[in-house]
Image (cartoon, rainbow, N blue to C red):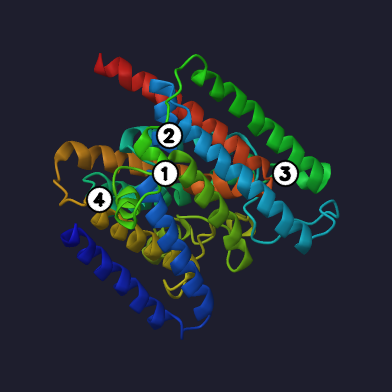
Amino acid sequence: MTTRFLPALAVFLAAIGFSFYIRDMASGQTLVFALFCGLALGFVFQRSRFCFYCHARDWFEDRNPRGVLSIILAIAIGLIIYTIVLSSWMPNPQGGSLPPDIHIGPVSWVLVVAGLAFGFGMVISGSCISAHWYRLSEGSAASPFALIGTAIGFALGFMSWNRLYSMAVAEAPVVWLPAHFGYGGALLVQLAFLAILVFFLWRSFAGKPKQTATEADATVPSLAQVMQRIFTGRWDYWIGGLIVGIIGALVIIRMKPLGVTAMLGSQTRAFAQEFSFFPMRLDGLDLFAGCATLPEETWMTPNAILLVGIIFGSFVAALASGQWKLPRINLHDSARGLVGGVLLGWGAMIGLGCSIGTLLSGSMAGALSGWVFGAAMFIAIWLGLKIKACLAS
């Protein structure tokens, strides 16, 4: 056990040291806040295996609803917290303005195509983008190539943006539900929709025998047993959903909404524009809220530091739980990671975010774009798994 905890402790101390390094920079307090949010997210992602694709696959293939229910729990908690925070910032949501920086995007067929591409990318690569970030710490052979493919997909998205913008995005409505129903009405409508989903999913538990608590479960665990439960196996699904929902909503108090693609997209855009891979002018792109891809003069942005924190946190969890291993690179994993990553990146760029930025943060804010992207994404996962099963048979 000690041999596992010492490397994990070293990584955690390195993260603490990095926090001291960035705290004296411009906006240092926000950067430190982003780092510790990322640490918590990375740790929870790894321990609870929080992954949109994996949770959806568990339901579609095994009718295990726990993962999808954890996603619903995260969205529901975020909806409540977002409503409280935004109502204090903008008491009148029906005044004709949108809250700044909140992930509320245009709704058109382009968004649907983006969600479908992202969903197919998850099926091929084996994870969503956020899961690929934390699976780096586990030695995943596909994740490094998936992230490289994501950068390529972003570049392809930038190349196709102007045409898609003129075809559909420019005139597409940007729908924020509180602007139409008020905060209370929008909250009730969305929670009611989530309740219907919960009822539908919960039916899969009907008729299954309930497990009874054993005598060992009824006793108060010792400190050693508590540590073992933290770092052995996986956490219950609901714990991941609960913590992700709380962090995902509270980050808006000190920084922009949660997202894991802004830094990768910004660096890809800066690199590609430097070599004139696509037009310098991307029509209307920088006017939309979402995972911003503005070329940055420095990579030391809150989003980038959040990703650093996610990697640090997931490494701590993977090392302490003994789930880290050296990656064994092979052609199959490299190819599926790269191809799937291209679809992930293209869909995230065109959809102005991924399963975290557009779906999670968007739906928490009451953006119709989040719900539309999510629906298209889950349809693509269902269809992709069907195609995958047919090819395997």
Amino acid, disc 2: His
The residue tagged 4 is 138
- C-alpha distance separating marks 3 and 1: 28 Å
Q: Name above or below for residue 161 compared with residue 168.
A: below
Q: Which of 359 and 37 is in front in this view?
A: 37
Amino acid, disc 1: Phe
Badge 4 or badge 1: first in the primary sequence: 1
**Residue 41, quarter of the rendered image:** bottom left
Quarter of the image with the N terminus in it: bottom left
Mark 4: few/some/many CA within 10 Å (<14, 14-19, 20+): many
- C-alpha distance separating marks 4 and 2: 18 Å
Classify residue 122 as left or right of residue 289: left
Is label 2 in contact with label 1 (beta carbons under 8 Å)? yes
Badge 2 or badge 1: first in the primary sequence: 1
Badge 4 or badge 2: first in the primary sequence: 2
In the rendering, which numbered label is found on residue 55?
Answer: 2
Q: What element carries label 1?
A: loop
Q: What element carries label 3?
A: loop
Q: Give the image location of residue 329, x and y in percent.
A: 15, 46
- C-alpha distance separating marks 2 and 1: 8 Å
Badge 3 or badge 4: first in the primary sequence: 4
- C-alpha distance separating marks 2 and 3: 28 Å
Residue 122 visible here = yes
Badge 3 or badge 1: first in the primary sequence: 1
Is label 3 in contact with label 4 (beta carbons under 8 Å)? no
Q: Give the image location of residue 380, x and y in percent.
A: 46, 28
Q: Name above or below for residue 357 compared with residue 15.
A: above
Badge 2 or badge 3: first in the primary sequence: 2
Amino acid, disc 4: Glu
The residue tagged 1 is 50
